[in-house]
């Protein structure tokens, strides 16, 4: 088993009406919470990778010998 790099912790006291939940409902919420957090973090990672690729592509445009002045961030020429 691999080490977990971090964990997101919460306490039931952080939420309203938690006392009305049954132990089974708390268990189901915890399982869904883990899935939602994992999915959200994966989406953030995917977006960060796409953003990095877009920035890299933009930075590399000025190295294109066929179109050396094609820069979106500095205008033309």
Image (spheres, rainbow, N blue to C red):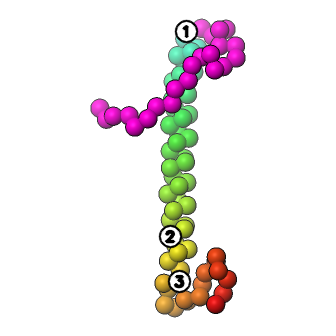
Q: Is residue 8 above or below residue 65?
A: above
In the image, residue 62 lies at what x, y percent? 53, 83
Q: Name the image quarter holding the N terminus.
A: top left
Residue that label 3 marks: 62
The part of the chain drawn in magenta is 1-23
The mark that comes first in sequence, 1 or 3, is 1
Whether residues under marks 1 and 3 lie with C-beta atoms below 8 angstroms apart, the answer is no
In the image, residue 72 lies at what x, y percent? 64, 77
Mark-to-mark CA distance, 2 and 1: 49 Å
Q: Name the image quarter holding the C terminus.
A: bottom right
Mark-to-mark CA distance, 1 and 3: 60 Å
Q: Is residue 12 above or below residue 55?
A: above
Residue sitting at 56 percent across and 41 percent down? 40
Q: Main secondary structure of the magenta part?
A: loop
Dot 1, crowdedness within 10 Å: few (<14), some or many (≥20)?
A: few
In the image, residue 35 lies at what x, y percent? 52, 32
Residue sitting at 66 percent across and 87 percent down? 76
The mark that comes first in sequence, 2 or 3, is 2
The mark that comes first in sequence, 2 or 1, is 1
* Magenta-colored stretch includes residue 39: no
Q: Nearer the viewer, mark 2 or mark 1?
A: 2
Residue that label 1 marks: 23
Residue sitting at 64 percent across and 76 percent down? 73
Q: Is residue 5 above or below residue 71?
A: above
Mark-to-mark CA distance, 2 and 3: 11 Å
Q: Say the numbered circle drawn on residue 56.
A: 2
* Magenta-colored stretch includes residue 14: yes
Dot 3, crowdedness within 10 Å: few (<14), some or many (≥20)?
A: some
In the image, residue 50 lies at what x, y percent? 53, 60
């Amino acid at each position: 088993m691999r080490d977990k790099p971090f964990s997101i912790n919460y306490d039931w006291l952080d939420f309203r009406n938690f006392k009305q939940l049954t132990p089974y409902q708390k268990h189901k919420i915890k399982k869904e919470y883990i899935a939602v957090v994992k999915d959200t973090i994966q989406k953030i990672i995917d977006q960060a990778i796409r953003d990095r690729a877009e920035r890299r592509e933009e930075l590399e445009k000025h190295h294109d010998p066929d179109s050396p002045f094609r820069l979106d961030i500095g205008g033309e020429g």
